Structure formats: structure tokens, C-alpha cells
Amino acid sequence: MFRYWILHFLFALTAYAQEPYVVVLGTAQDGGYPQAGCNKACCQAVWEKKLAFESVSCIALVDPSTGQRWIFDATPDFKIQLEALKHTTNNESNDLSGIFLTHAHIGHYTGLMDLGREVMGAKSVPVFVMPRMKEYLEKNGPWSQLVSIENVKLQPIQENGFVQLNSRLQVRAFRVPHRDEFSETVGYEIKSQGKRLVFIPDIDKWQKWSESLEGLVQSADYALLDGTFYKDGEINRPMSEVPHPFVTETMSLLDTLPISQKSKVHFIHLNHTNPLLQPTSEESRLIQKKGFQVARSLQIFRL
Ligand SMILES: [Zn+2]
Ligand SMILES: [Zn+2]
Ligand SMILES: [Zn+2]
């Protein structure tokens, strides 16, 4: 009998290890952490190596049963994130099954440059793109060269259409309001057979969106949401130029939800000025007390 239970346990453990998951590969805003030119207290401690460096916001979807790995956004920290992904998945291959891009702001696509002739010389990496993003990459150098010499193979996607990745994983892009100078901006829904994760690294104020934030959180198992700025007044320029929802605003919009719902929210895409970058800051403790969470690099979400 005992042997039966041991076998049963080992079987369950193996099955669990084969389940798909999302792993966080970075949580900082486009400029990373520390940020170029910043010698204020927020970054000085990182320059002096007293606080840890943090990569730009990026997640990877992993299916251990097939060995497939997709990343969401190609950031300026791509090389660090590819290594982290290889290490965490125990798979030393450089192969990616695909890259999904959210939009054409520098923190979200410029990592594609590492796939080009000057660096990896990658072969036909599938890059999933919305129509304007596709045109932008096709028509502007240096990206156009990645397309013409087939380092990447652009895979057009449409708003709200599901992309079937394999028999148990699907991805859907949905439009969100943002400064769309060069491309549309999308968030992604990642769906397994049982669970749903939403990833919105960049969005303007929630009020500009036609969807309900509360509904989004309630319908997902995990919500990785734009937490660029903790609160108003955080940077020395008009914050209306960069109208992200403040973490304080997102929390008050979700205030009436029970803790079980709030705890699905993980803030990501944190500006170098955001105290949530430090797990021990007063603000990190406060939001945890309210039931919310901050995404941390190498954190895993089981799907
Ligand atoms: Zn961004
Ligand atoms: Zn700084
Ligand atoms: Zn952006």
C-alpha cells in the first residue's frame, strides 16, 4: 500500500512538472533599472551594486512536455533574458518557438536586434505581430533587414483572434489604449486548458479603456498589470505625458474586490523611480497588506 502511494505521489509530481507555466524574465519599465543618466537615490545604489539590477518587463510561456518556449516582448535586455530562460528551463538550446510583441516602444521590441546578422544570425524565428507593428518592422531599418534576410518570420495576428500554439495552449491579443505613434498596443491573454493569464505591461489610464478592469481581474487567474508609477508626482515632468494608471489608482479601482481577487494582480513594468522595485520598501509591504502583489523575476505562474 505504501509503495502504491509513493508511486502515486511520484506520478502526480511528474505530471505537475509537465504542466505549462509562465516565468517572469524582467519587471522594469522600458529604460530598465538602473536607468541611463539617473544618479538619484533610486538608481545610484544599483550603480554601486548595493541593490540588484532588474531587466525590462518580459515574460516567457513554457511547455515542458514539448520543450516549447515563447517570449512576450523582445527587450533591450534580450540576451540576459534568453540566458535566464535557458537556465530556468534546463534547456541550453537558443531556440524560441516564437516572440509575441506588444508594441513599438523601445523596451518592447528592440531586443530583436540580437537575432540579426551582427549577433545570433537566427533563422526564421516566428515573431507574432499586429498589422501596424508588422508594417513598421517591414518598412524601417534595421528591422527590415531581419525580415528580408529571414532572421525573423513575421506572423500576422489579429485583435481577439486566438493563436493555437499547441494542443493545450492558446494566445489572444487585445488592443489597449496607449501612445500608438508607430504601432498599435496590445495586451495578451495566455490560455491553457484550465487557466488564464493576462499580461498588460503598458496601458494609459484604465478610464480610457472600454473594458472593465474589475471584470478582467475576475475572469483571469493571474493579471500582470502596468505598474509603471506608484503614485502621482513620482517624476519631475508632467505625468500627463505618460498617462499610465498609478498603482494607487489601480488599487482603489479594485478596492471592493475580495482578497482572493486582488491577489491575482501582479504589478509589472516598474519605472526606476517606483519603490515597488524594492521588495522590502514600505510601499511593497503596504500593497501586500491590501492583498496585491508585485511580479518578481523568475517568479512562476502555473497554468
Ligand atoms: Zn513600456
Ligand atoms: Zn533612477
Ligand atoms: Zn509603451
Image: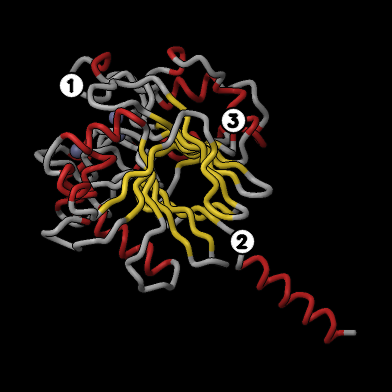
Q: In percent of the image, x 58 and y 38: which residue is there? A: 264
Alpha-carbon span between mark 2 and mark 3: 23 Å
Asked whether mark 3 lies closer than 8 Å to ligand 1, one says no
- In this rendering, does residue 288 appear at all? no
Q: Foreground mark, 2 or 1? A: 2
Q: In percent of the image, x 18 and y 18: which residue is there? A: 237
Q: Amino acid at mark 1?
A: Asn
Q: Which mark is residue 217?
A: 3
Where does residue 35 sit, x and y in percent of width and height? 17, 41
* Foreground of the two, 219 or 127: 127
Q: Amino acid at mark 3?
A: Val
* Foreground of the two, 14 or 261: 14
Where does residue 124 sit, x and y in percent of width and height? 30, 56
Where does residue 159 sit, x and y in percent of width and height? 46, 28
**Residue 301 drawn above or below residue 171:** below
Alpha-carbon span between mark 1 and mark 3: 32 Å
Q: Which mark is residue 123?
A: none
Q: Secondary structure at mark 1?
A: loop
Q: Quadrant of the N terminus?
A: bottom right
Residue that numbered label 1 is attached to: 236
Label 2 crowd bin: few (<14), some (14–19), many (20+), radius 10 Å: some
Q: Of the two numbered discs 2 and 3 on the same chain, state the one appearing first in sequence.
A: 2
* Foreground of the two, 180 or 239: 180
**Residue 150 drawn above or below residue 182:** below
Q: Foreground mark, 2 or 3? A: 2
Alpha-carbon span between mark 2 and mark 1: 45 Å
**Residue 218 drawn above or below residue 212:** below
Q: Secondary structure at mark 3?
A: helix
Q: In percent of the image, x 40 and y 17: which residue is there? A: 205
Q: Is residue 250 left or right of residue 35?
A: right
Q: In percent of the image, x 40 and y 31: which residue is there? A: 226
